[in-house]
Image (cartoon, grey):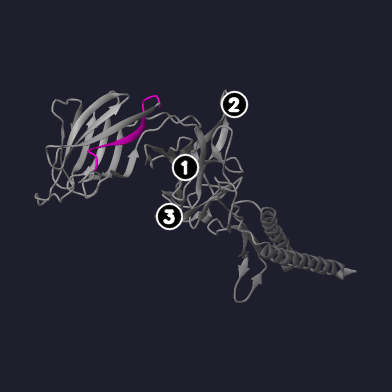
Amino acid sequence: MSLFGSMTTAISGMNAQSRALGHISDNVANSSTTGYKRVDSTFEDLLTQSTAKIHTPGAVSVTPDATVSLQGTITQSENPLALAISGNGLFSVARPSGTDNAGNIQYDSATPLFTRAGDFTKNAQGYLVNGSGYALEGWPVTDGVANTGTLTPVKIDTAAYPPTPTSTARLAANLPATPTTNSFSTQVPGYDELGNARTVTLNWTKSETVANQWSVEATSGGASLGTAVATFSDGTDATMPAGTLLSLAPADGVTTLTTTANAGKGSDASITFNGATPLTLDLGSYGTAEGVTQYAGTAYEQRSLVVDGAPAGAYSGVSIRDNGDVVLSYDNGKSKTISRVPVVTFPNADALQREDGQAFSLTTEAGAMQVSEVGTEGAGTLATSALESSNVDITAEFSKMIVAQRAYTANTRVLTTTDEMLADTINIRR
């Protein structure tokens, strides 16, 4: 019986080493595959009988040992959409599920897959897909706010950026306390609802009868949008330092504008000209050096002018920031965030089920997935324009290959020896 047991054990050893060689061959073949996670081999002894008096030959089995949590080398890439995770976690991706009547590829977001293969590029439909055809998923972003309750494939919309009319201008300037001339002009560039250029001129005039007081009239296309009066503190008001805005008010008879009330030092100071396209002129804060002041000097000094609004803009490109934001850029200088790429982590990522194309699917053993912002709650950080290489070490795989070959050969020797011993037993009667 022990001879046949030895033969069975040798055969199980040959099978185990064959499977281990299969793991090695898979690793070697994918040594240059982006995001590939090697498969190691774990051998296990199977007993039939073993006591203090007798031991019967058993068998050996081999199981694959995943290395999903073992990171490969991160290298820079010329692809601006390439991504790599440094640390813990995976990308969420969607598998192609077919095409619609127009021939467009559909993606299955209901069955999540996960990968470290971040060689993403924009396909013909605008989706960011990796080399295996899986679409990168992210949190959709609307008006700068990410919807963290859902994951959808990231799709690049190349439509034009619509024009936005100018509605606010923030001015920081100094009106001279002792001007050589009592009038100054400020040009405020902007756009109307159609994206046409529209310039508003601010005409500042120092009062000849009231100290520390200026009027400001806004005109556009030769028409007046209204006039307001700005009064500056002379320092007698303890809460309003000299040279800072004390009050704003419409000029006599002006009904086409509104001003913010002076609620005290630090409150907003602005004028809204209620024309066909209302314009709010932000002059800073009452009682502070922020915005428009009246300090010593003889000439008007403009420090900064920030104006919103934009003409229509054509799509010019897409980029991904370190925090995972997918940002569209336009040739009018505007940009828009459409999605935020999170990182998915698991209590036991090595227990995920392997799928084609360096992807993994959910298992009970892996535990519940956690979707987190980049670099938070144990999730890794994001490297942009970078790729994670396979975690296969060719030198180590060759060493394991030699061991597997020798072990297999040794098992064949056991089988040959057992066969010879059985033949000798059969020939005893001769």
* Residue 272 in sight from this viewpoint: yes
Quadrant of the drawing holding the N terminus: bottom right
Q: In the rendering, at what x and y percent does residue 156 appear? A: 50, 35
Mark 1 = which residue? Answer: 326
Q: Is residue 411 left or right of residue 69?
A: right
Q: In the rendering, at what x and y percent does residue 146 appear? A: 38, 41
In magenta stretch: residue 221:
no
Quadrant of the drawing holding the C terminus: bottom right
Mark toward the viewer: 3 or 2: 3
Q: In the rendering, at what x and y percent does residue 423 appear? A: 84, 66
| Residue in the picture at 52% in, 36% down | 316
Q: Is residue 377 left or right of residue 129?
A: left
Q: Amino acid at mark 2?
A: Gly
**Mark 3 to mark 2: distance in Å?**
38 Å
User: Which of these two is toward me, 305 or 386?
Assistant: 305
Q: Looking at the rendered structure, which numbered label has been put on residue 103?
A: 2
Mark 3 = which residue? Answer: 375
Magenta-tinted stretch: 180-195
What secondary structure is found at the residue carrying circle 3?
Answer: loop
Q: Amino acid at mark 3?
A: Gly
User: Which of these two is toward me, 327 or 284?
Assistant: 284
